[in-house]
Amino acid sequence: MSKWFRYVLIVALALALTGCGVRTAYNNLDWLIMRWVNKQVSLDNEQELLFRTALDEQLRWHCASQLPDYVSFLNTVDQDLTAGRLDAERLKSHAETLAGFGRQLLTETRPVILDLMASLDDRQVEELLEGVDKRNRELKEESVDADPAQRQQEQVESLARGMKRFIGRLNSDQEQRLFQWAADLKPTGEQALAQRLAWREAFAQTLELRSDRTRFDALMTELLEPGSDWSDEYRHKMELNRQITVVALADVHGLASERQVRRLRSRLNSLADDFQHLSCT
């Protein structure tokens, strides 16, 4: 989905999975987020000051109310690992918990995003939409025009890289399971592109109403809701792919060595420790 501002909402979680230190990244989230936003649209001095002020407030909220929940979540996953019950059903439950964190972030930060978008002038709107168009062209190249075999290879490599950060190098059986996962996925490129193009038009039309905050806030709030504009066919395929992915991840875990499980537990405990130290409570 071409919703550039959704990246702002999940950046705190995403940075925890990158190669940089979690504590360093989190302590610099204000700068990192401002830098990212300014790459999407050039803010003037007044907009930047207002957004920074609101961002500081949101980060204080996140530090105090969300990080303790992240610690509890990671401890629960570790308990499942210890008890040997990290099967597909438990993974699905944990995925729903993560989605809940995302919804909380969206709900809390939505007023800030609405205020920022309502303050954009015509030049800034044009700049923002140009970025959306660029990402839509990239999606077309990567998911619609690309060779299916190459796309599957890239999907496997991408997921394998993410897993490697937590469990280390995958064994041959695990890699084979990921190739089967990629082959089982239902193709969604054309539906995703059609949905994103339709969303882009609705987004542009809503931005034209930004001087009318009542109508603008109502329409933009609906556009900000993840999946609210999906077609039935696209929604069905996405749900199937989520189920296929959860089962595949459970199978990869079932093929894990003791060393990989120890590394995963160590990584989760390290993240929990980082979040505990960063919490404002």
Image (spheres, grey):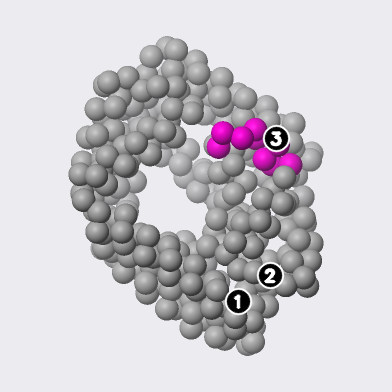
Secondary element type, mark 2? loop
Q: Give the labeled residue for mark 1.
A: 124
Secondary element type, mark 1? helix
Q: Main secondary structure of the magenta part?
A: helix
* Amino acid tagged 2: Leu
Secondary element type, mark 3? helix
- x%, y% of residue 250? 35, 30
Label 1, label 2: how far apart the Cα atoms are:
8 Å
Q: Give the labeled residue for mark 2.
A: 43
From what the image shows, is residue 237 above or below residue 119? above
Q: In the rendered structure, which segment of residues is drawn in magenta?
A: 18-27
Q: Residue at x 34, y 46 (%)?
A: 242
Q: Which mark is residue 100?
A: none
Q: Which residue occupies the foreground of this view, 262 or 193?
A: 193
Q: Residue at x 59, y 83 (%)?
A: 122
* Amino acid tagged 3: Arg
Q: Are marks 3 and 1 in contact (CB under 8 Å)?
A: no
From what the image shows, is residue 178 above or below residue 102? above
Q: Give the labeled residue for mark 3.
A: 23
* Amino acid tagged 1: Gln
